Image (cartoon, helix red, strand yellow):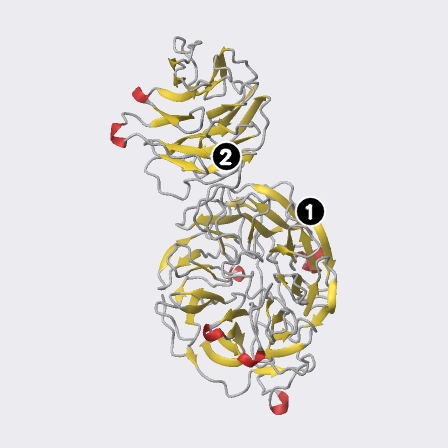
Amino acid sequence: MTNPSPDHRRHARRYPRVALFTATMAVTVVVWATGIARERPVVLPPAAIPPEAPPAGGGPGAAGGQAVQPVLAWERTYAGVTFRESSPVEANLSGPAIVVGALDGNVYGLDSVTGADLPGWPVATGHPINSSPAAADMYGTGADEVVVASGWADSGRCAGGGVFVIDPSGAVRWVRAGVDPLCRTLAFHSSPAVGDITGSGVADVTVGALGLQSWSWDANGQLNAGWPFYTDDTVFATPALADLNGDGTTEVVMGGDASPGGVFRPNHRGGVVRAVRGDGRLLWRFATNEIVRSSPAVGALGGHQGQSIVFGTGNYWVNQPGGASDYDRVSALDTSGRLRWTRHLGGQTLGAPALADVAGTGERDVVIGTADGPAGGRVWVLGPGGDPLPHWDGVPSGGGVVIGAVSTADLNGDGAQDVLVPTGSGVLVLDGRTAQPMFSIDAGHAAFQSTPVVTADPGGAVGITVAGTEPGGVGVIQHWVMPPSSGAQLGSQGWPTFHHDGRRTGNANPPPLAQRQCLGVGIAGYWEAAADGGVFGWCGAGFHGRPAPSGLAAPVVAMASSPTGQGYWEAAADGGVFVGMARTPDGRGYWLVSADGGVFAFGDAPFEGGGGRVSLPFRIAAILATPSGRGYWLVGDEGSVLTYGDAQFFGSTGNIPLRSPIVAAAATPSGQGYWLVAADGGVFTYGDAPFLGSTGAVRLRQPIVGMAATAAGRGYWLAAADGGVFAFGDAHFVGSTSGLHLNSPVQAIAAPAG
């Protein structure tokens, strides 16, 4: 942690910093930016700012007959500190606070009422910060943790950085670094999005990196199963969080860069938007011919069923030989990744869009600014179909190019969202209904490449906080307050901060911070059994008991449901020999199988043969019963399948070289097929067993140890040793132990019968 120097001070300005308009500002400031593809650096130099001068006319003037003038509540200046693209966030740090990062590597936490440093703040990260901090109560304490990523593209993608979770006192709870095959210390530009993407009941932290992989950790800093996700190129964009398929769990929507080469196929020159499940599996991808530096936004647009995913692009390939026609596009996709509409705006669209009711119609519109280009430095508002709203077909920003994302609030109380536009020459505020300037903040005095945050302050006032840099490299944080006479309010259907909310979900209706729930009528749950006999039930799979750990002579290795689903058996590896279990249809008997193929029948389970008297060249991994209960299959760890009784042979992997041994299997309800699964998650299907997916291409934190099929036979679950559960087909993910500290590894998974 660092303490502020004497230059980090509060003081009152000697000249007005707010100007009201009846016409557009004449000042135009040019800044430029470049994107990144693979290992090339991004360069975002400070904006060129005209010398300070008092506003003309001796004071503010009215706009549209409605004088709306915020009052400066407090200001902090920091000599030699640059605030660039890190957008301030409102947080509850045992009281209302504003948090923002700077290129000096510090995260600044200020009392939002007084502007004073909070105890324990600022917090040093050791690397420049261009990422916007997120804030969320990750541990249910009633106060927020701050999550921020550090690292700077200008220093190189391998220049280092990390992801920090900081508690309200300023203490770092945990920090994680990113690595990939080309780099041991990745930098992060993307802002963390905070929300449960695994359904484990705890918040996750998901972020892109300036490397070849994106990352997701749970609230305790444990890497989520299936992550890091291989992106094949750098990611600047902040991920959005949304339930894309209506299954009650949250997916991740990520923008990113793409360039020829690398191991990913297909690859191309341009960019990409991806939807990724919480277990690290790709749902879909949408390609562009320019990088997607713009952070996607998710929300319902009028006239379209369901949510839309809206994004701009970037400005890397347009500046390379051959150019890129998508550099000025803003596009909307449906939740399956299909294009709804796209529009050229005549200027680079690298800022994140906002989805807000600018027209006051009760429906959200798309708001985005443009950077360089034939029509750069403008603000657009597009309706649900991508057509500009009246008055909003490229309104000049008044301060040159727009790199940071806009925010919105109803600052004059007329029921429409007004637009706050950060520029290289101050922040311009435009009336939502008319697109006319209302007022500006720091026009000609400071450069802003971050998003203003609008807050509901104590006492009912509406506040505006900005962070930027003045001439000479002086950083500035200001908090302005709209007077009650303005009628200002946050309003409905707004976008008051970068990526919509403090968790940076990018979603007009943010998904739950944490969720662990059954997903609806008819959705089946499952049990996980640990080696010490511990049983974890999810979504209706009730807990019915477990053996006392002191009573176990050997670890539990298998589990089976009773016919009604209201009970279960656990089988231990007594003598170190048993490896699997299967029950009869009526539940009045079961079989145990040993690693050498010996079969032991109990109750009404008939003995139909086994491999115990024959020396098998492999170990048995599983036993499966036929639907009639008059036969069974034995599955070897190299993929051989042995049949007994009325069990039929449908194929095996016995003659196929495997990367990992077979560890589990499941039979279809008809008995006319079966699945085999390897420790790496590869799934092999035979007979009428459909292939519905696998984790063979996913980097697992722990190996797969178990498999269970759904009652309909149109899906299956895979369980990993750390308790991670992967669902395929009509199997639904309803929870896992992957975010918990387990005394013993998970050994088996079973679904309730009946």
Q: Residue at x 50, y 24 (%)?
A: 666
Image quadrant holding the N terminus, namely bottom left
Crowd rating for badge 2 (residues with CA inside 10 Å; few <14, some 14–19, many 20+): many
Asked whether 169 or 519 is in front, the reply is 519
Mark 2 / mark 1, whichever is N-terminal:
1
Q: Could you tell me residue 679's position as x and y percent?
A: 46, 30
What is the three-letter code of the residue carrying label 2?
A: Ala
Front disc: 2 or 1: 2
The image quadrant that residue 506 belongs to is bottom right
- Residue at mark 2: 524
Q: Is residue 387 above or below residue 626?
A: below
| Gap between marks 2 and 1 measured at Cα | 30 Å
- Residue at mark 1: 338
Circle 2/circle 1 CB separation < 8 Å: no
Q: Is residue 699 above or below residue 70?
A: above
Q: Could you tell me residue 728's position as x and y percent?
A: 55, 34
The image quadrant that residue 117 belongs to is bottom left
Q: Could you tell me residue 14's position as x and y percent?
A: 50, 88
Asked whether 94 or 686 is in front, the reply is 94
Q: Secondary structure at mark 2?
A: loop
Residue at the extreme left of the image, as rendered: 550
Q: Is residue 622 above or below residue 307?
A: above
What is the three-letter code of the residue carrying label 1?
A: Arg
The image quadrant that residue 96 belongs to is bottom left
Q: Secondary structure at mark 1?
A: loop
Q: Is residue 610 above or below residue 182?
A: above
User: Is 167 on the left or on the right of 477, as rendered?
Assistant: left
